[in-house]
Amino acid sequence: MAQRLAGRFEGRPMAAVNLTPLVPVLLVVLAVLAATGGATETVLPLQLPSCTMPPPHYVEPPRTVVSVLGNGRYAIDGQVVASDAVPARVKALVAARGASMVYVRASEDMPYAQVRAAIALLKETRIRVTFLPDWMAA
């Protein structure tokens, strides 16, 4: 029976591909990649935004804090001021202190309409307005 099976496969071509001639070619490709792969020492052009730091002796100007008390009343740095006097008082304080912004403070239960009215009133001064959370007020 072994003789019968041996004769069956002799007349057909081999079904597998011979990879032996490709081994040296792959080794050469691998050697070239290994030799040139580590040579990426080119400098990449990196554009970073410029940053200016204040000098070490820089002291931040005192904050100008406007507290919204409600019913058209405001407190500027702890002093109660009527709404019609707020823009002039804030301009004078910011100019005297050399600051660039005004901080607005309001309690959590203050109606949003009153806080928005305070911001609109402070926008008349053309000075930046930002909120001051209660934990930063100290």
Image (cartoon, helix red, strand yellow):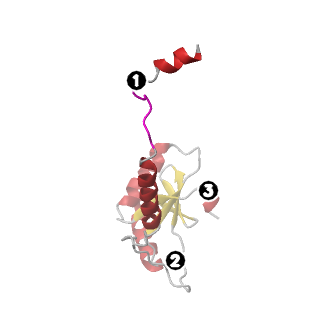
**Pointer 1: what residue?**
12
Camera-nearest residue between 69 and 7: 7
- Name the front one of labels 2 and 1: 1
Camera-nearest residue between 44 and 95: 44
> Residue 8 appears at what percent x and percent y?
47, 18
Q: What residue type is labelled 3?
A: Asp
> Residue 55 appears at what percent x and percent y?
51, 84
- Looking at the image, the residue that sits furthest to the bottom is 57
**Pointer 2: what residue?**
61
Instruction: Identify the residue at horizontal 61%, vertical 56% (top origin).
Output: 134
Residue 114, disc? none
Camera-nearest residue between 77 and 80: 77
Whole-Å distance between the Cαs marked 3 and 2? Answer: 20 Å
SS class, disc 1? loop
How many badges with numbers are in the image? 3
**Pointer 3: what residue?**
134
Region rendered in magenta: 12-19
Sooner in the amino-acid sequence: mark 1 or mark 3:
1
